[in-house]
Amino acid sequence: MRENSHILFHSIHQLSRQLTRYLNEALEPFGLYNAQWSVLFVLKEKGTLTQKELCEYLAVEAPPMTRTIQRLVKQGYVEQQAGVDKRKKHIQLTAKAVGEFQAWEAAVLEANEKVLKLLPENSQEALQQIISEWTLGLKGGAVDKRD
């Protein structure tokens, strides 16, 4: 498998780029991109979070997250509030974002359904299981423990 690992990871990377591009096209009419959608979706699902919590949950470094949040603030979709510790900024959706969220989500769901039609349902379930197990292993530090 070692010699095929380059091909496997290259394929995963290419798939990720294709999915991101496809989602960006679906969000383009709303002036949004995949990175912004990820933040908006997580805030809708989880409520107010700190920037650090968003970075950890989405596995994004602080500088690109800062830029994404700044764009969303400029668009009027999120607001930042200082916490008790002034260094922590709490990020939450604005009323404007809550009002527009349903349209964004509908576009994303439509794009997802079109992409999923390329895979039989049993393959979708198997893929979801594999991705979930792999993600849990990576988050749990399983890679470091196996060395």
Image (cartoon, rainbow, N blue to C red):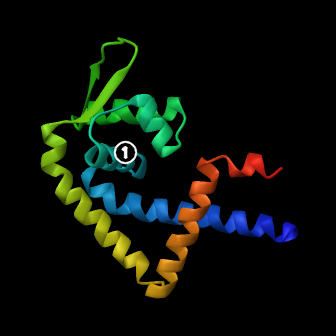
Image coordinates for residue 52, horizontal then vertical, percent: 45, 30
- The residue shown at (25%, 52%) is 30
User: Quadrant location of the N terminus?
Assistant: bottom right
Q: Nearer the viewer, residue 81 or 68?
A: 81
The number of numbered badges drawn on the structure is 1
In percent of width and height, residue 106 lies at 23, 65
Tell which of 105 and 86 is nearer to you.
Answer: 86
| Horizontal and vertical percent position of residue 28 | 32, 56
Q: Quadrant of residue 69?
A: top left
Residue drawn at x 42%, y 47% is: 35
Q: Is residue 132 left or right of residue 109?
A: right
Q: Which residue is mark 1?
A: 36
Q: Looking at the image, which is closer to me, 42 or 8?
A: 42
Which x, y percent locates residue 61? 55, 35
Identify the residue shown where x is 41% and y is 30%: 51
Q: Residue at x 43, y 65 (%)?
A: 22
Compared across the picture, whether 49 is left or right of 66 comes to: left
Q: For this view, does 138 lie left or right of residue 66?
A: right
Q: Is residue 25 above or below residue 63?
A: below
- 134 relative position to 1: left or right: left
